[in-house]
Image (cartoon, rainbow, N blue to C red):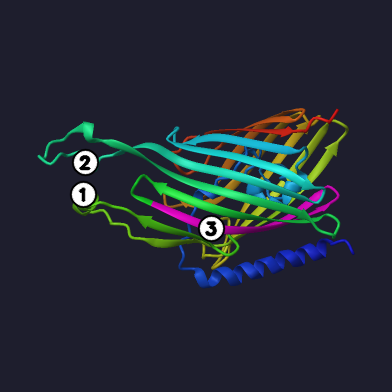
């Protein structure tokens, strides 16, 4: 079979764009922001590179970024974990991933993601039936989003071409008041050509549906009514498809130094957004990242993302950007990564410290 060239890849990307536009345009009444906890990213290496990672990824975190990249996993089992905190520690974000090669042509993976705020005061019963304030009546609850992702990757007969997919189950819960179950699919492809990688990932390819249900007692409804809050009703929330296009290039300088450069383009199809390239209905959000490595042991990373135009107090528009930096250390089968990211350059949120760990497990040879 003939090797797929650059022209063929451009045709694949153009075809993916047409399919996504046809899928998303009839659904522009869906909310722009749904399941946003799945847009944060996993792995300090990726976040240090500004999330320009769909083509560069080749480890256990591929289950999130690009399932086709799972074929880069070495060893019998690769494990990845991450923890980060946002908004001065109020919100906790955690990730655990597993990846296991099935054979020389396929790999399976599992990812778990949780973004939650715990110990939220519940003041519904702050005032007792006699009208007195009783702080002992305050209870707490958690609001958390969970994702369970099963990934699969396989090499095709075309040299350098691999495909992958995700099946994900979403579970979101707000204390005892409401919960949602959802299901969605991702599809991905990657093409390796010498030291150049091209990738295309369609997230929520069929739309991810979250079915919300609420359980509110009469006391809660009464307090909501008295305080002018809207009473939620059972509903279905749809996350529309988006297309991630990526390119990464590996450079070697001598026998010790290496450089990885990466560019990602996130394409949304739900109308004009505040991105660097925007139109109706397609908006494009670019991300740039690089990684400098020494002897495959020490790494320094940087990236920029989240380009936005904002209006200041003087009514002038300015271009803002989210900076990201990181470092990494790899010793044999263990990799420790750190990233410092600004999740919102325009917000009052503090920079966030992200730590992640990745290690390979090997079977002991039989005696």
Mark 3 to mark 1 CA distance (whole Å) = 33 Å
Secondary structure under tag 1 reads helix
The percent coordinates of residue 175 (x first, y second) are 36, 44
* Sequence order check, earlier mark of 2 and 1: 2
**Main secondary-structure element of the magenta-colored stretch:** strand
Residue holding disc 3: 183
The percent coordinates of residue 156 (x first, y second) are 81, 58
User: Is label 2 in contact with label 1 (beta carbons under 8 Å)?
Assistant: yes
* Depth check, front residue: 306 or 200: 200
Residue 219: which disc? 1
Find residue 25 and report its image quarter.
bottom right
Decide if residue 115 is on the left or right side of residue 175. Answer: right
* Sequence order check, earlier mark of 3 and 1: 3
Density class for disc 1 (Cα within 10 Å; few <14, some 14-19, many ≥20) is few
Density class for disc 2 (Cα within 10 Å; few <14, some 14-19, many ≥20) is some
Q: Which residues are magenta?
A: 179-203
The percent coordinates of residue 57 (x first, y second) are 71, 45
Residue holding disc 2: 125
Decide if residue 145 is on the left or right side of residue 245. Answer: left
Q: Quadrant of the C terminus?
A: top right
* Sequence order check, earlier mark of 2 and 3: 2
Density class for disc 3 (Cα within 10 Å; few <14, some 14-19, many ≥20) is some
Number of marks in the image? 3
Say above or below: 249 vs 351.
Answer: below
Q: Residue furthest front?
A: 367
User: Is label 2 in contact with label 3 (beta carbons under 8 Å)?
Assistant: no
Residue at 76 percent of width and 54 percent of height: 154
* Depth check, front residue: 18 or 175: 175
* Depth check, front residue: 335 or 309: 335
Q: Tell me if residue 104 can be seen.
A: yes
Mark 2 to mark 3 CA distance (whole Å) = 35 Å
Say above or below: 199 vs 41.
Answer: below
């Amino acid at each position: 079979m003939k090797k797929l060239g650059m022209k063929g890849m451009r045709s694949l990307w153009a075809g993916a764009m047409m399919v996504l536009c046809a899928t998303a345009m009839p659904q522009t009444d869906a909310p722009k922001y749904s399941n946003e906890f799945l847009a944060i990213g996993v792995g300090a290496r990726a976040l240090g590179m500004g999330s320009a990672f769909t083509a560069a990824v080749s480890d256990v975190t591929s289950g999130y970024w690009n399932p086709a990249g799972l074929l880069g996993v070495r060893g019998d089992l690769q494990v990845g974990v991450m923890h980060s905190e946002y908004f001065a520690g109020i919100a906790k974000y955690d990730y655990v991933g597993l990846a296991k090669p099935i054979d020389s042509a396929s790999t399976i993976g599992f990812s778990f993601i949780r973004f939650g705020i715990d110990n939220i005061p519940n003041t519904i019963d702050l005032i007792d039936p006699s009208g007195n304030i009783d702080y002992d009546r305050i209870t707490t609850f958690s609001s958390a989003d969970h994702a369970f992702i099963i990934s699969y990757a396989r090499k095709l007969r075309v040299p350098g071409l691999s495909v992958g997919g995700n099946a994900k189950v979403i579970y979101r819960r707000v204390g005892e008041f409401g919960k949602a179950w959802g299901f969605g699919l991702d599809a991905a492809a990657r093409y390796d050509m010498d030291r150049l990688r091209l990738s295309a990932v369609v997230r929520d390819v069929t739309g991810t549906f979250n079915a919300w249900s609420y359980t509110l007692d009469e006391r809660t409804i009464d307090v909501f009514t008295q305080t002018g809050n809207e009473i939620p009703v059972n509903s279905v929330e749809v996350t529309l498809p988006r297309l991630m296009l990526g390119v990464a290039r590996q450079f070697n300088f001598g026998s010790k130094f290496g450089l990885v450069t990466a560019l990602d383009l996130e394409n949304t199809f739900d109308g004009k957004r505040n991105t660097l390239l925007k139109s109706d209905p397609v908006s494009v959000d670019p991300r740039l990242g690089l990684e400098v490595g020494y002897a495959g042991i020490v790494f320094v990373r940087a990236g920029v993302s989240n380009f936005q135009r904002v209006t200041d107090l003087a009514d002038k528009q300015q271009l803002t950007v989210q900076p990201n930096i990181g470092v990494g250390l790899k010793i044999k089968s263990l990799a420790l990564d750190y990233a410092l990211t600004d999740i919102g350059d325009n917000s009052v949120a503090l920079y966030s410290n992200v730590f992640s760990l990745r290690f390979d497990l090997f079977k002991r040879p039989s005696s």
